[in-house]
Amino acid sequence: MKKIYELTAFEIKEKIASKELTSVEVVTAIFNRIEETDGEIGSFVSLRKEKALEEAKIVDEKIKNGEKVGALAGVPVAIKDNMVSIGEPSQSASKILEGYEGIYDATVVTKLKAADAIIIGKTNMDEFAMGSTTTTSIYEKRTKNPRDLNKVPGGSSGGAAASMAADQCYISLGSDTGGSIRQPASFCGVVGLKPTYGRVSRYGLMAFASSLDQIGPFTKTVKDAALALNVIAGIDDYDSTAEEIEVPNYLDSLTGDIKGMKIGVPKEYFIDGLNEGVKKVVNESLEVFKSLGAEIVEISLPHTKYAAPTYYVLAPAEASSNLARFDGVRYGHRTENPANIEELYVKSRSEGFGDEVKRRIMVGTYVLSAGFFDAYFKKAQKVRTLIKNDFEKAFEQVDVIFTPVTPGPAFSIDAKKTPVELYLEDIFTIPANLAGIPGISIPAGTTDGLPVGIQLLGRAFGEREILKAGDAFEQALKERV
């Protein structure tokens, strides 16, 4: 029999609703699990145990009295440290925001609360979501991969992925700017969904690159991802980029039947550097889709090779602009005894930002500067359009696109990778952010004992198709075990 913390979000939701378990029992079991495991794993940077138990009691009372409750009633949920929540530490893992507490709730937090979810704490991340290892965090905790404590959990949402892989919660929200949900999901062997740009409000998400950032869930199953997306998706008056498109019930699309579905396989994603173990899992996964009656179609996304350089012009440029607001004046870290206002700005930012954030601010400022704007930033925007057009053309032929998530499995925490080598870890995930389309990483197997995920990409607002295909794949894998 499964322990409480081993159950899925959907199973927990149903057991609480049927009074088989109380929310207090579930929340207590989760905090016990965190106390047992987080000293080693380091998923969380702040916890709200007393408040969570109080909120769980309120949910239990509602259910006892027969009152209407939300879609996630009593379910423990974690959120990434770059999402603001009122009265709670919200530091984006940066010294520049040391001691900052939210003065309002991000829209996703508001929606979770409206769904009666129980928020248990904030998870570790790369500083301002810049990284793919969760090692650029200012916190002393170093997050480790629960599948192998000597390996990185991925990033920037490594804490969120690790919390899910370690059974420390049932849903964990992360953010994805160039793969920061899907890459750690693959490394940690959990499901990670990046919705379409504009599907989920970014209000209250500390901006890295505003045209690329998107909030999405980590879960244990595709069904749980659909459940979470039902809650957090939708229009928001506080976010002009949240599209006015009706939110369907994503659970309804999980029929298990994908006969006749056309799945595109882009030749550009099967590069020479692809790890042999990853290649084996990917090829076996394609066979699973074939066995389910899907039609595999070879496609081409010709501008894929330009995605990484395009991203590393545009994302730092937007970061340079967004992070200019952190100046040591209004909140967060301020240098001591500055001689003048210029020294206040320079020293506060120099002391407050880590090396990776400084590196990207400098790159971004350079490409936006006079004389280089046309040569770099403007040209990158044009290439971004070409990449988006590639996907639109591909989706005229296929329903879903299938790719690897990363070139290899999780690597050692002590690996001495250069910044460029780390940037290339996101080579398969970046194009979806540039095009604004949804993507999901689903556990598909292992190589050398480490998890390997597959990535499914859909057309804009085509989450139903990738969830449907992903769920059918997941169920087929379970039947084979």
Image: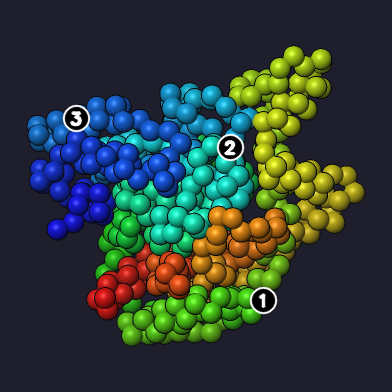
Q: Is residue 342 left or right of residue 435?
A: right
Label 1 sits on what residue type?
A: Pro
Q: Residue at x 33, y 57 (%)?
A: 220
**Which quadrant holds residue 430?**
bottom right
Q: Which mark is residue 302?
A: 1
Could you say whether the residue bearing mark 2 is in a helix, strand or loop?
loop
Task: Report the front residue among 431 and 356.
Answer: 356
Compute the Cα span from label 3 to label 1: 55 Å
Could you say whether the residue bearing mark 1 is in a helix, strand or loop?
loop
Q: Give the labeled residue for mark 3.
A: 57
Outermost residue on the right side: it is 371
Compute the Cα span from label 2 to label 1: 39 Å
Q: Residue at x 65, y 67 (%)?
A: 387
Q: Residues within 10 Å of mark 2 (few under 14, many from 20)?
A: many
Q: Residue at x 55, y 69 (%)?
A: 408
Label 3 sits on what residue type?
A: Lys
Counting residues from the N terminus, which is met first, the one under dot 2 or under dot 1? 2
Q: Which mark is residue 138?
A: 2
Compute the Cα span from label 2 to label 3: 34 Å
Report the label total.
Answer: 3
Mark 3 vs mark 1: give the one in front.
Answer: 3
Residue 373 placed where, x, y %? Answer: 83, 50
Counting residues from the N terminus, which is met first, the one under dot 2 or under dot 3? 3
Q: Is residue 432 left or right of residue 219?
A: right
Q: Residue at x 41, y 46 (%)?
A: 40
